[in-house]
Image: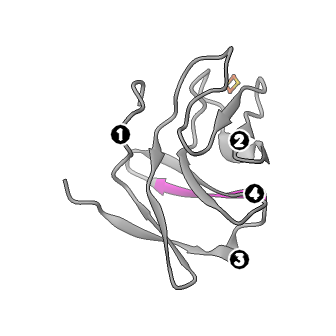
């Protein structure tokens, strides 16, 4: 499958522990920046009831959903136990100082 990379913006366009939303045909994708300047892209839709993960609080490599506080792992999209569910994640890479994201979701998330 072709990978379909798009430009998200520069690292500095996303505040540390914040997110930026990328609108796609498949729905909004939240691109997160962690305290350590790692970048993760996750569907902006909580696996619980669809809350906007981009509005959540990032700590470490997790985001807390703003609606009911489920914690979602940014690298896998999976909810932290005891909650169960998974949001699609997308490959990201840096090209110079530009963040690139693939619109082809990573495999491995059964509910996405
Ligand atoms: S919708 Fe995210 S925790 Fe309920």
Q: Nearer the viewer, residue 18 or 96?
A: 96
Q: Residues within 10 Å of mark 2 (few under 14, many from 20)?
A: many
Can you give x and y, in whole percent of width and height, for residue 100 in the image? 46, 70
Classify residue 108 as left or right of residue 14.
Answer: left
Q: Earlier in the sequence, mark 3 or mark 2?
A: 3
Residue at point 78% right, 57% down? 17
Q: Judge depth for marks 1 and 3 and give the one in front.
A: 1
The residue sitting at the top extreme is 82
**Residue occupying image coordinates x 62% and y 27%:** 79
Q: For numbered disc 3, what is the local secondary structure?
A: helix
Q: Is mark 1 within 8 Å of ligand 1?
A: no
Q: CA distance from mark 3 to mark 4?
A: 11 Å
Q: Which residue is tagged 2?
A: 62
Residue topped by disc 4: 18
The x and y percentages for residue 68 are 77, 23
Q: Is residue 22 magenta?
A: yes
The residues tagged by marks 2 and 4 sit, at their Cα atoms, a distance apart of: 11 Å
SS of the residue at dot 1?
loop
User: Judging from the image, what secondary structure is the residue with disc 2 in?
Assistant: strand
Q: Which residue is mark 1?
A: 107
Which segment did they paint magenta?
17-23
């Amino acid at each position: 499958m072709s990978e379909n990379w798009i430009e998200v913006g520069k690292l500095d366009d996303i505040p540390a522990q914040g997110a930026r939303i990328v609108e796609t045909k498949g729905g909004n994708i939240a691109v997160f920046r962690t305290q350590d300047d790692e970048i993760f892209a996750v569907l902006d839709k909580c696996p619980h009831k669809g809350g906007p993960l981009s509005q959540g609080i990032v700590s470490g490599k997790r985001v807390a959903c703003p609606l009911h506080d489920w914690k979602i792992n940014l690298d896998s999209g999976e909810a932290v136990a005891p909650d169960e569910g998974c949001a699609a994640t997308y490959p990201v890479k840096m090209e110079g100082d530009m963040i690139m994201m693939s619109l082809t979701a990573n495999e491995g998330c059964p509910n996405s």
